[in-house]
Image: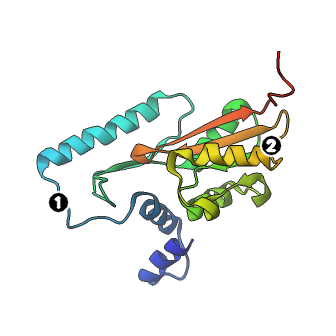
Amino acid sequence: MNEAALLATRRAAAEISIEDFTAAMERIVAGLEKKNRVLNPRERTIVAYHEMGHALVAAAIPGSDPVHKISIIPRGIGALGYTLQRPTEVVESILETEGLSKKNIALYIFHQANLRIVEAVASRLELESSRIYGNIERYGNTTAAAVPISLSEAIIEGRVRESDLIMLASFGSGYTWADILLRWLDPDQNQD
């Protein structure tokens, strides 16, 4: 929200637009544009093919989030381009495919890379904070371990009960998102 407000202020707008939120999300996830990092034509071609590969994989996987944007503008440290998918669309797509509503999900656990991203996703999905588990304020960004650590803690804290539906969402290289919907079965009660 703060980043979107800054962008709106810089263009002297009276309101924060969806474009401000989109640009803010890109800046948070992908980093600032590196305008001084110029790619030569061969590098641009390689990056374009690489990012197109991410988009084709996303298009080929049933229920995958649609690609929102592909860029070959260098951002952050080491990212020469990116393919952006929106996490809220992934969650909504899985729910639609499974014939469920957001209220059917007992707990949502999102990748803990950045608290603002988690808050933005929760806000766009209109989720109550009591149904979201997070731990970034305790550990920071634990990268690939974020979702399993959060799930483990939620189980230990009693936030996950037998037969609960849990939505796990994470992102990785190429700035692509993946979600999984699971039903928790207590291993102590299901030993057959």
- What residue is disc 1 on? 38
Q: Amino acid at mark 2?
A: Val
Q: Earlier in the sequence, mark 2 or mark 1?
A: 1
Could you tell whether 100 is left or right of 170 in the image? right
Image quadrant where one finds the C terminus: top right
Mark 1 residue crowding within 10 angstroms, few (<14) / some (14–19) / many (20+): few
Image quadrant where one finds the N terminus: bottom right
Could you tell whether 25 is left or right of 82 in the image? right
Identify the image quadrant of residue 121: bottom right
Question: Which residue does the image show at 69% across and 38% down from the upper left?
Answer: 95
Secondary structure state at the residue bearing disc 1: loop
- What residue is disc 2 on? 160
Q: Is residue 11 above or below residue 178?
A: below
Question: Which residue does the image show at 80% across and 29% down from the upper left?
Answer: 185
Q: Residue 80 at what x, y percent from top left?
A: 27, 52
Identify the image quadrant of residue 126: bottom right
Is any part of residue 120 visible from this angle?
Answer: no
Secondary structure state at the residue bearing disc 2: loop
Identify the image quadrant of residue 120: bottom right
Q: Amino acid at mark 1?
A: Val
Could you tell whether 81 is left or right of 154 in the image? left
